[in-house]
Amino acid sequence: SDKEKKKMTTKVCFEFCQQVPFSQFFGLVRGRECWCSPFYDKRGTTDGFCDLPCEGNADDMCGGDKLSTVHEMHDCNNLPAKRCHGAPPPISNAAKMCSWGDTAAHSYCAIECIPGFEVGQNGIRCKEFGDRLVFSWASWVGTATCIPKNCGTPAEEPHSRHPTADVIFPNAVQFQCQLGFSLDQAALGNRTFSQECQTTGKLSASQPCLP
């Protein structure tokens, strides 16, 4: 093959073993031979030195007569996940947050808001920085918000009037009965009532205005 015709170097051996399934180590011996292996056993002869230049590059050592120059290969996509220690910075109106995370399956930080609030947006992630093959670390990035629930616009109640804007927790909207109507049918009876925006995100019950 074309690879077999190439004169041996560390790069040639690496590129060949990279294509061999399950290979994690590769070695060079006698200045021209390349081997691939899923494991590396340090036991063996200690006689001699790795002092033979590679046939394809005299500045590159390719083992010795008996000893191999051994290299370990890494798949950067399959290195262990980095961990974000501790919880992200606190979020206003959050009841619960994740206490840790990593750069793999646990990169997302789940948030639970206090009653009456809901997650508006959550961009908090555990992100890796640096060079995976040299030195890298993980840290929390992004922000999140817990926003008050919107109970919507109150429904029309006959013989009453009220503001038409959305009601946001923990606010309430006040209704006023028209002249000649009250909550208890009394001439001078109570003519006002409120609907509160509840922690469920629903308005409390309305009351009828009676003649």
Image (tube, rainbow, N blue to C red):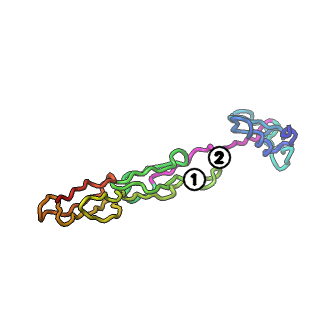
Rendered view: 28 above or below 113:
above
Rendered view: 6 above or below 120:
above
**Tag 1, which secondary structure?**
strand
Rendered view: 100 above or below 154:
above
Left or right: where 199 falls relative to 131:
left
Task: State the image quarter where residue 151 is shown.
Answer: bottom left
Residue at 30 percent across and 60 percent down: it is 170
Query: Where does the C terminus fall, quadrant-wise?
Result: bottom left
As measured in the structure, the alpha-carbon distance from the residue carrying label 2 to the one carrying label 1 is: 12 Å
The span shown in magenta is 66-87
Rendered view: 145 above or below 81:
below
Q: Amino acid at mark 2?
A: Cys
**Tag 2, which secondary structure?**
helix
Instruction: Read off the residue under disc 2.
Output: 76
Q: Tell me where residue 122 appears, x and y as whole percent.
A: 47, 55
Residue at 71 percent across and 39 percent down: it is 25
Residue at 83 percent across and 50 percent down: it is 59
Q: Which mark is residue 128?
A: 1
Closer to the camera in the image, 196 or 44: 196
Task: State the image quarter where residue 14 is shown.
Answer: top right
Q: Amino acid at mark 1?
A: Glu
The question of residue 85 being in magenta is answered with yes
Q: Tell me where residue 167 appears, x and y as whole percent.
A: 33, 61
Q: Tell me where residue 9 appears, x and y as whole percent.
A: 82, 44
Residue at 85 percent across and 48 percent down: it is 58
